[in-house]
Amino acid sequence: MPEPIKLDDFMDWIAERSPEQTEFHQTVHEVVQSVLPCVNDNPDYLRARILYRLVEPDRIVSFRVAWADDRNDVQVNRGYRVQFCNAIGPYKGGLRFHSSVTESILKFLGFEQIFKNALTGLPMGGAKGGSDFDPRGRSSGEIMRFCQSFMTELYRHIGPDVDVPAGDIGVGEAEIGYLFGQYKRITGHFNGTLTGKGLEFGGSCMRPEATGYGAVYFLEDMLHSRDDAIEGRSVVVSGAGNVATHAAEKILHRGGKVLTLSDSGGFLHDEDGLTEEKIAWVRKHKARHGASLADYVGEFGGEWHEDKKPWGVDCDVALPCATQDELGQEDAKRLANNGCIAVVEGANRPLTIDAFQVVKDADVLFGPGKAANAGGVAMSGLEMSQNSARLSRSAEDLRTALRQIMRDIHNTCAEHGEGKQGVDYAKGANVAGFRKVADALLAFGVV
């Protein structure tokens, strides 16, 4: 029997190989502490050094992106693609355009993506990419020129059977259009190399809704497992983009009351609750780069809280849907003390490690992002299959498919996370995703 792996020794190895990559270290620690028992109980995993292989990306591509702004001044950004693991399918993961993008953040997101994609049941590997370019405040012409320059380098590393990027923060349907247009122009190929495309050129119904709807479906199944429901519950949501607004919309469909949305400037608190009309206004308003959610108050009333987060508002459920590490330890304590019964991650790891521990200790239901927000990549996987078959599916058909995928993810996490104290969904997601990918790596031999 090979020597078992010790968590501290493994994390020291990670820190030595990837120094100063805090975000990556945190997500590896969270996953490894969950899966280590099943690794140490499996001699094949130990002999093949599966864990050591899995935390090392297959490759990291870094490149210069030079482009001209509206004044014809040359700007220089850095682009990345982290192709982490293609053991169960082509690399799949979003592109993020934001000033905070670093290699560490993309490695953290790409590592999470491995397990998220595995949980969907679809043949997709894990990857992530992006740039430190920030589209906020930029004209459409500047965004187009940046996207074209970005794709001029990226195109050589992607393809429908190799790596299929999608959108993420700062990369919506317009950016995907510019990126795909340049890809098609360079290669001469019209294929499913990008997902999140417009319906006019190979996109899928339900893609904008999928992540937000999927998070609420996961919440619904968690509550049903305890003979509870969303109906009548008050919900605090952060963010004001696709994920947040569609999560808010689906909460309304299930009879819940949404009290907040937020952006980088603060949060909006509407005690009367958001309606579909109000959510539609937010979606249209925030589509303008740089528009502030504070303008909501002049339109519908409510209170605007400058430079604050919504986690102090009394609620039954919290849905953080903005960005990573947005909900800290003190925020989690406020939620628990105010009687919050469930926290579901609509964004990628919005809870810090300390916040997660508070939620866990308080016996608050917790839906981890790699499971709860997998609806977006699941719909991207369905878009890939539609592109390959040169077919399209109806919104109702895809909504039904999404609902079933999220129910299957919930049940898989519950099965692998069952313990004496109830279901640990975070552990269940990690173990289920890991086992699927690890077994595929074993089947391939040492590659």
Image (spheres, rainbow, N blue to C red):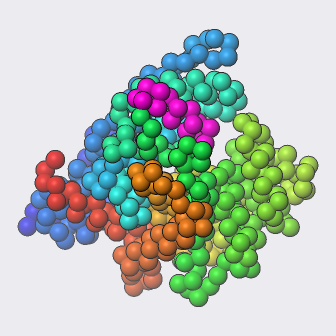
Q: Residue furthest bottom?
A: 227
Left/right placement of residue 446 relative to residue 340 reads left
For residue 12, say whether it is visible: no
Residue 174, position as x, y percentages in the image: 62, 38
Residue 171 appears in which quarter of the rendering?
A: top right
Q: In this image, 105 relative to 302: left or right? A: left
Q: In this view of the protein, can residue 184 be seen by the observer?
A: yes
232 vs 114: above or below: below
The residue under the point 49% across, 40% down is 95
Q: Percent from the top left, x then y, of residue 409?
A: 44, 70
Q: Residue furthest left?
A: 1
Q: Which residues are magenta?
A: 168-188
- The chief SS type of the magenta part is helix
Q: Residue at x 79, y 62 (%)?
A: 276
On whether residue 186 falls in the magenta region, the answer is yes
Residue drawn at point x = 75 percent, y = 38 percent: 288
Query: In the depicted view, which residue is nearer to us: 201 or 337?
Result: 201
Q: Position of residue 195 (x, y in %)?
A: 49, 47
Quadrant of the drawing holding the N terminus: bottom left
Return the residue nearer the eye: 282 or 424: 282
Would you place residue 298 above or below residue 148 in this image?
A: below
Front one among 156 and 352: 156
Which of the 4 quarters of the picture holds residue 332? Answer: bottom right
**Considering depth in this image, is 13 or 41 the residue closer to the camera?**
41
Query: Residue at position x 59%, y 16% from top?
Result: 68
Q: Is residue 166 left or right of residue 412?
A: right
Instruction: Residue 157: give x, y in percent of width and height.
Output: 35, 34
Report the label total.
0
Q: Is residue 371 magenta?
A: no
